Amino acid sequence: MNDTTREETQPLQPLIVLVRPQMGENIGAAARAMLNFGLTGMRIVAPRDGWPNPKAVAMAAGAGRVLDDARLFDTVEEAVADCSYVVATTARQRGLFLPVHDAEGAVKEIRTRQAGGERCAILFGGEKSGLATEDVARANAILTLPVNPEFSSLNLAQAVLLTAYEWRRSVDASLPFDSPYDDTPAPRQELDGMLAHLNGVLEEAGYFYPEDKRITMERNLRTMFTHARFTEAEIRLFRGMIRQLAYWGRGGSDS
Amino acid sequence: MNDTTREETQPLQPLIVLVRPQMGENIGAAARAMLNFGLTGMRIVAPRDGWPNPKAVAMAAGAGRVLDDARLFDTVEEAVADCSYVVATTARQRGLFLPVHDAEGAVKEIRTRQAGGERCAILFGGEKSGLATEDVARANAILTLPVNPEFSSLNLAQAVLLTAYEWRRSVDASLPFDSPYDDTPAPRQELDGMLAHLNGVLEEAGYFYPEDKRITMERNLRTMFTHARFTEAEIRLFRGMIRQLAYWGRGGSDS
């Protein structure tokens, strides 16, 4: 069993407790899923193939440190002995009188408890049949996901992934990069300038024909470009395009 | 290429487009992730190992029908030719002037467009390096996830899973089962009845000693059981327990 140093430095994270997991690959994939969303405290109860497990290490790839720091226990009771709020993940109703939350709701409860200094844990059952009902009965609440009832089986790492994702969103929903995109439409005077420019060039090109349709044609152009909601940058781009078409239409001269 | 029958019956779902996926296992896992959250329309662009792919079928397990109905294309251009709103998933900024959304935001945009009758698609890049910048440039918007910047690589099926999960939550966040749990505390008269019962039994058992501490002791009991916020069912359970203890304390008689 490792020391608790790393766990202790992250008191405001829920511990992810894998209960009787079977395949090492799934333990490794769960470690990756945790680290993808910033969780690092893993506990493992009675893994079928013993511990450490080379297949877990191979699958964890860059998340090996989550496995290095994982703590091993014989029973769920021991794994949550130092926790005061425990959530059990299950896809099946157990007839237990426990509150049922989705991942977002469970994470919200956990954050409230943690703000009060409580250590929290989330239990995930093994691949074969999930948590035993006795395990769920040790929890304060059930976490379940809004899966398609006709196809509800999620694998272990996927259940961990969705939970870790909601955890991170609750802590820091910021995205890894910002957008340079600004879709604010240009002020009308910019649009009007563009339309005057365009109409002038189209006039020169002989577009407004017959003459009695001119008003309607100009109006339709205005509607179309109003609808397009061009930004100032897009208007500059468009005017550059028109300028070049006009230059070309004039046989390579500028006016 | 299959016909579009199944896709056409689900016009209000975004199509999941896998662009140059490599491992069949990941295509199968993506199919499972889609069906877990109710998505069924998959399109595949230029899969490395050809199509159909037996490894995809093996991994898809119960989600084989998603693969059966998947449509194959040579290029992204063809795969989204009938779509009017396209979202590209990427973990990297591309210098493109596109809006950036998280999964929840992207799904919200898609639902708005679909309500207006638009066919929508979400592009996912292959395992090696994700989408090409040219693919992203075909999109109306970028979808990215709030991953841990120090460990951001999600596999294909995980990215599909998180997107499908947000999709389902936006459509129907209901959980697969309800809770029989009702934590409404019993009305005070029930609590008072329980305390009177308890105090009577404790009196009989010689608990209130010394006499001058009785008031404090009773008050502490009241505070403790008020804090416990027992429901009516819990109060019945508690009183049953006290009744039996009293029966036993009396040497097996009822009064």
Image: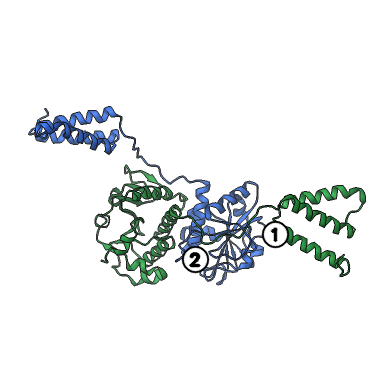
Chain colours: A blue, B green
Mark 1 secondary-structure assignment: helix
Residue shown at 18% from the left, 29% from the top:
A197
Binning the other alpha carbons within 10 Å of mark 1 as few (below 14), some (14 to 19) or many (20 upward) gives few
Q: Residue at x 89, y 54 (%)?
A: B208
| The label number, if any, that marks residue A26 in the structure image | 2
Place residue A227 in its image quadrant: top left
- Residue A198 shows which numbered tag? none
Q: Nearer the viewer, residue A67 or B157?
A: B157
Vertical side of B40 occupied by B152: above or below: above
* Percent coordinates x, y for residue B181 in the rendering: 62, 58
Mark 1 to mark 2 CA distance (whole Å): 41 Å
Left or right placement of residue A91 versus residue B218 in this view: left
Name the spot of residue B118 as percent of width and height, x first.
31, 51
**Residue that lies at the very extreme toward the left in this rendered image:** A251
**What chain letter is assigned to the residue under label 2?**
A
Q: Is residue A63 visible?
A: no
Comparing labels 1 and 2, the label whose residue is closer to the camera: 1
Where is residue B65? Give x, y as percent: 36, 68
Q: Residues within 10 Å of mark 2 (few under 14, many from 20)?
A: many
In the displayed structure image, the side of residue A29 where residue B73 appears, left or right:
left
Marks 1 & 2, CB-CB < 8 Å contact: no
Percent from the top left, x then y, of residue A95? 61, 65
Q: Amino acid at mark 2?
A: Asn
Dot 2 falls on a residue whose secondary structure is helix
Q: The C terminus of chain B lies in which quarter of the figure?
A: bottom right
The foreground one among B160 and A58 is B160
Chain containing mark 1: B
Residue B212 lies left or right of residue A56; in this view the side is right
Residue of label 1: B233
Q: Amino acid at mark 1?
A: Ala
Residue in front for this viewpoint, A168 or B248: B248
